[in-house]
Image (spheres, grey):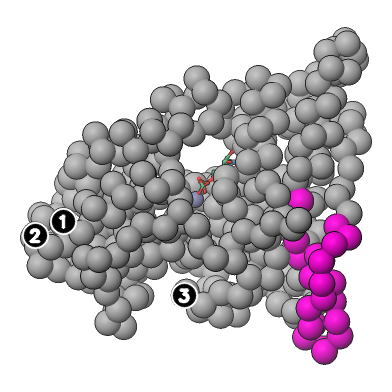
Amino acid sequence: MLVLGIETSCDECSAAIVADGKTILSNIIATQIPYHAPWNGVVPEIASRKHTEWIYTVVKEAIDKAQLRVTDIEAVAVTNRPGLLGSLIVGLSFAKAFAWARNIPFIAVDHMLAHLYAPRLQTDNGEQVTDSEEHTAENKKQSVEYPFLGLLVSGGHTIICRVDNFDDITVLGTTIDDAAGEAFDKIAKHYNFGYPGGAVIDKMARNGDDSAFNFPMPSLHKGGFTEGSDGRNIQCHRYDVSYSGIKNACINQLDNFKIKKTEHTNEDIAASFQKTAVNILLRALLNAAEDKGLTTIVAGGGVAANSLLREKLAGQKHLKCVFPPLELCGDNAAMVAGIGYHYLARGDKSTLNATAQARVEGFKKKYP
Ligand code: KG4
Ligand code: ZN
C-alpha cells in the first residue's frame, strides 16, 4: 500500500511516500529553522503561516521524487497530535482534502508514537536507513520485537514507556517540568550558542571539558508508588526526570562564567551541561529497564540524535539499544506514513471530523 505521510506538528513541513509501512520512496523535510532562529525558538504564528505556504509544494515534491502520480497514492496518514495547534491544522486539513478529493482513506496519528516507529523504516533499495555512526551501523537489519522500552525525547516531551505494539504504549515516566530538548534549547538561548540548541550544544561539547562545571542531578522526592514486575512497590519517580534544576543551575553560571571567561570556554559549559542532561535520562531509563525486565530500548525524537546519549546507550552491553538514523530522529513524514500503514492495514480510518489536539493525556506530568 502506498501511503502519503504528512507532518506539520511543529517547525518541519514534511511529506513522504512509504510503501507497506516499510520502504521510504521519498521523504521531503522542509525546515523552518532560519525563520525561527532570530527568536531562538519556534514562533507558532510563523510556523503555521510557513506550513500554509509550503504544504502543497512539499507534498508535490514527495510524489514527484517517488516517481509516482497523484492517482497512485492509496491512503494518507497525518500527524494530528500533540503539537502546535495552528501547525497541526495545516497538515490535517491538507490530508483531509487530499483524501476526500481522491476518495481514499486517511488516518490521523500520534506524533510521539510515530517517532517510536522510525527505526522500522528502510530505503527503497531494501537497506535499513543508516547514518555513518558506527554504533548505529550495529543496528542495521536488527529486528525490533515487542515489548520494548521506549525513550521519547523531543523539544516538547520526555517520555519513558513500555511499548507492546505500534499503537500500545504504557507511560512509565515523564518529565515533571521541562522536556530534555527544551532544556538544550533554553541553555543555548541564554548563552547565545545558536538555534536549535540541541545540535549546537552536541557539537560544541565535543571540544569541551565535561568536568569544568558540576551541574547537579535532580532528586525527586514527591509522588507515589507503583507496582514493580516482582510485586514490590517502587517509587514512580524512579522513571521521571526533571530539567528545571539543571537548567537554572546552568543559567545561573552565566554571570560567574563571564567573569572567569579566561579559565573556561563555551565548549566547557556545553559539555558539562550535556553530561548531566544525558545522565538524567540514563538514570530513569536504566531504572525502568531493570524494574520492568525489558532488555530492548528504542529511542526516538530530536534528542535521540544526541551523540553522547547514543554512545552511552550503545555502551550498555546488557541492553539492545535501537536508534533511528540521524535523518529520522527529528520530525519527518516517513515515520507518519510508516505507522499510518499499520492502522490502515487493519481497517482503521479517520473521518473528516478528526480534529487537531495540542496535548495528549499522560504525556506530560506536572506536580504541584
Ligand atoms: O522531535 P523534534 O525534531 O521536534 C519535536 O517534536 O519537538 O525534536 C526537536 C528537539 C529540539 O529541542 C532540539 O534542540 C533537539 O530535539 N535536538 C537535540 C539534538 N538534535 C536535536 N538535542 C540534543 N542533541 C542533539 N544532537
Ligand atoms: Zn517530534
Distance of label 3 from label 1 (alpha carbons): 25 Å
Quadrant of the snapshot with the C terminus: bottom right
Q: Are marks 2 and 3 in contact (CB under 8 Å)?
A: no
- Front residue (pair 316, 127): 316
Q: Is residue 231 magenta?
A: yes
In the rendered image, the vertical position of residue 133 relative to residue 19, given as above or below: above
Q: Residue at x 59, y 62 (%)?
A: 363
Measure how far apart labels 2 and 1 are at the Cα level.
Answer: 6 Å
Residue 16 in sight in this render: no
Q: Quadrant of the rendered structure where residue 307 is? A: top right
Q: CA distance from mark 2 to mark 3?
A: 28 Å
Q: How many marks?
A: 3
Sequence-wise, which precedes: disc 2 or disc 3? Answer: 2
Quarter the N terminus occupies:
bottom left
Q: Is residue 137 left or right of residue 129?
A: right
In the drawing, what numbered circle is on residue 101? 2
Vertical placement of residue 156 versus 165, above or below:
above
User: Which residues, given as a range, are shown in magenta?
Assistant: 220-242
* Residue at 41% from the left image edge and 25% from the top image edge: 35
Q: Quadrant of residue 350?
A: bottom left
Residue type (three-letter) at the residue carrying disc 1 = Ala
Residue for badge 3: 167
The residue at which mark 1 appears reads as: 97
Amino acid under label 2?
Ala
